[in-house]
């Protein structure tokens, strides 16, 4: 008897419930509290507000609230605003190519409502009362009239309360606050005619009064730019460019103070960044970045801003034309303000402190020099082929001879013992140290060597052997930009282990109570500012922890730089410290600290 089995196939494709679909869509738009800040601020701008206040608690995880005095919404509009793809900006497909407002796709509020608890209060000027709506998990749980001023207040509470897995991926409060500050600054920079404020945990971080673009840039980036901005103005039939670039001396090692706006929308464009960098090519070091805040205004039909959910990436109809105009506008501005490449005749500070430079030449020294045969050889005509040999150089070989020492098994032990024997050392180009040993010689890069020495010293400090702090007799204060102040606040505990004693003093100001012993008195502010700049240089490198970024930043900032003159004792100490390190042959970044040259290799080079 044969048994028959019948398999009943059922349909397996079905529509997602609205709340799940909204949560998936929200993942593209609302990635962190800063994403919600961007969307809510842009909506407030579109509402015609001239006063916008941002209030956050717990780095936006528990509260993000935006209050504006814009035109407000009717009861029906307030309810509709939280529906997916609900927008007042687009009625037909052609409107998509004439967009000049900030938000337009109708995804922001729906996405926020899908992953947070939302409270909305809004009122139009002509209405007697406003509307209060409370939404949770995309569902309206409460709606009623409310007494409220004209405008809109929207509060996003407990972000990702219903998606705990995504909440776990949020960074520390300080890191998330930095993202919020970045988004706030990008919107506030674009609209200097609007008052903006940012309050975090009850403390005001930004208070930006209405003013000109230059005033807004100085308010945000700091007074150091007040007299160091170059105006960029270029008007053509195709596009208009206006804004400011920093003078070459303001260039930094990081690219934080750089803003490009297209039709008042902040964008990221490596292509246009290259156009600006090319304009600065002969004015700043290759590893430096200029400050710029440039606004490009052109027909919306010439670009597509709908290529990414965050709208920070756009496509131009003709990239090459925009590139050429931006490059030309910046070059023209720099030329107009007489900022052109010049020969740098400034002496190194270390050179200026030498006796030969700082002290006047005595008559005795002048007469002695003038009577020498070498001076006469160069001062008289037709003497180039008659330079005499100096009898003082007959024992030149003695400079490079070293006493022989026993040969230990390990190379580093050999080198270390040779240096303990005080091998002759010579500094080349104020950058390299030549050290002879029995097998040949070493070429040590003084900055790379010092980076390795400092790194291992800082690691030991972090691991429980703190570096001694040198107390400041007259504590200095340092005022930072709001974003840098947030960053420094995050780094304070680790910096204390590394010898810095800093106290927050309010209004983005810190008191420098103490510094590591190797920080020169009077140079404390610059040292801290440079550490922050170097830290931001590492900020996008995900393979480093916050602490590791700080250690590497301090090494790069505090290491002896190329071009520094070292005494014989300083060279001896540097090389000895290098070969006392656990890893003496490379910097923390993997660059070699020294190269070896054997006698055999040198003999081969000369055919011996």
Image: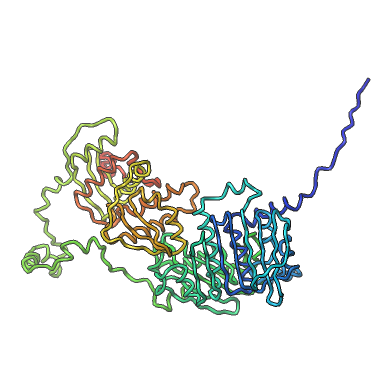
In the image, farthest residue toward the right: 1
Q: Name the residue located 29 percent from the left edge and 53 percent from the top edge.
A: 560
Q: Is residue 78 left or right of residue 384?
A: right
Position of residue 40 measured from the top left corner of the image (x, y, whole percent): 62, 64
Relative depth, front residue between 429 and 44: 44
Q: Name the residue located 62 percent from the left edge and 59 percent from the top edge.
A: 156
Q: Is there any visible trace of residue 256 in the rendered image?
A: yes
Relative depth, front residue between 414 and 164: 164
Q: Is residue 154 left or right of residue 289?
A: right
Relative depth, front residue between 265 and 434: 265
Q: Is residue 547 above or below residue 534?
A: above
Position of residue 380 measured from the top left corner of the image (x, y, whole percent): 12, 69
Q: Is residue 505 above or below residue 244?
A: above
Q: Is residue 205 left or right of residue 339?
A: right
Position of residue 242 measured from the top left corner of the image (x, y, whole percent): 52, 76
Q: Quadrant of residue 585?
A: top left
Q: Quadrant of residue 526?
A: bottom left
Position of residue 120 measured from the top left corner of the image (x, y, whole percent): 67, 63
Quadrant containing the N terminus in the rendered view: top right
Q: Quadrant of residue 250?
A: bottom left
Q: Is there any visible trace of residue 321 in the rendered image?
A: no
In the image, farthest residue toward the front: 147
Q: Is residue 107 above or below residue 436?
A: below
Q: Name the residue located 8 percent from the left edge and 65 percent from the top edge.
A: 365
Quadrant containing the C terminus in the rendered view: top left
Q: How many marks?
A: 0
Q: Is residue 244 left or right of residue 498?
A: right
């Amino acid at each position: 008897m044969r048994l028959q089995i019948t398999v009943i196939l059922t349909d397996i494709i079905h529509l997602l419930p609205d709340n799940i679909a909204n949560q998936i869509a929200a993942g593209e738009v609302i990635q962190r509290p800063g994403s919600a800040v961007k969307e809510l601020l842009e909506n407030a701008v579109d509402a015609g507000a001239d006063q916008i206040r941002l209030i956050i608690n717990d780095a936006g995880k528990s509260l993000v609230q935006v209050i504006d005095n814009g035109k407000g919404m009717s009861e029906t509009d307030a309810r509709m605003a939280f529906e997916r793809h609900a927008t007042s900006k687009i009625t037909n497909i052609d409107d998509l190519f004439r967009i000049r407002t900030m938000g337009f796709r109708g995804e922001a509020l729906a996405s926020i409502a899908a992953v947070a608890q939302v409270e909305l209060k809004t009122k139009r000027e002509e209405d007697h009362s406003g509307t209060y709506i409370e939404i949770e998990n995309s569902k309206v749980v409460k709606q009623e009239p409310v007494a409220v001023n004209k405008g809109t207040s929207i509060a996003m509470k407990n972000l990702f309360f219903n998606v705990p897995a995504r909440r776990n991926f949020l960074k520390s409060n300080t890191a998330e606050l930095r993202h919020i500050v970045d988004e706030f600054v990008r919107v506030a920079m674009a609209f200097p005619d609007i008052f903006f404020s940012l309050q975090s945990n009850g403390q005001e971080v930004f208070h930006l009064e209405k003013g000109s673009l230059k005033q807004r840039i100085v308010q945000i980036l700091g007074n150091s730019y007040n007299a160091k901005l170059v105006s960029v103005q270029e008007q053509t039939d195709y596009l208009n460019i206006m804004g400011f670039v920093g003078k070459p001396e303001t260039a930094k090692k990081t690219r934080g103070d750089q803003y490009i706006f297209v039709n008042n929308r902040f964008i990221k464009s490596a292509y246009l960044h290259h156009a600006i960098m090319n304009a600065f090519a002969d004015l700043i070091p290759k590893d430096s970045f200029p400050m710029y805040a440039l606004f490009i205004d052109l027909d919306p039909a010439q670009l597509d801003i709908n290529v990414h959910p965050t709208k920070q990436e756009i496509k131009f109809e003709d990239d090459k034309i925009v590139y050429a105009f931006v490059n030309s506008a910046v070059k023209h501005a720099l030329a107009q303000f007489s900022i052109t490449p010049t020969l740098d005749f400034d002496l190194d500070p270390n050179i200026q402190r030498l006796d030969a430079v700082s002290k006047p030449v005595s008559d005795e020294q002048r007469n002695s020099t003038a009577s020498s045969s070498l001076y006469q050889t160069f001062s008289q005509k037709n003497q180039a082929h008659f330079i005499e040999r100096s009898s003082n150089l007959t024992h030149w070989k003695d400079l490079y001879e070293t006493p022989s020492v026993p040969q230990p098994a390990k190379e580093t032990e050999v080198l270390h013992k040779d240096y303990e024997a005080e091998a002759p050392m010579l500094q080349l180009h104020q950058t390299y140290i030549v050290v002879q040993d029995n097998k040949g010689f070493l070429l040590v890069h003084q900055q790379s060597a010092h980076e390795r020495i400092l790194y291992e010293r800082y690691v030991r400090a972090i691991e429980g052997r703190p570096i001694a702090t040198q107390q400041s007799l007259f504590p200095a204060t340092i005022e930072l930009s709001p974003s840098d102040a947030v960053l420094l606040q995050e780094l304070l505990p680790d910096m204390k282990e590394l010898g810095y004693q800093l106290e927050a003093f309010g209004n983005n100001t810190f008191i420098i109570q103490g510094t590591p012993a190797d920080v020169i008195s009077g140079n404390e502010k610059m040292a801290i500012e440079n550490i922050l700049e170097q830290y931001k240089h590492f900020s996008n490198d995900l393979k480093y922890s916050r602490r590791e970024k700080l250690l590497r930043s301090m090494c790069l900032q505090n290491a002896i730089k190329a071009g520094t003159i070292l005494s014989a004792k300083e060279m001896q100490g540097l090389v000895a410290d290098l070969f006392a390190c656990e890893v003496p042959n490379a910097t923390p970044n993997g660059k070699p600290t020294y190269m070896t040259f054997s006698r055999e290799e040198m003999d081969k080079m000369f055919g011996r």
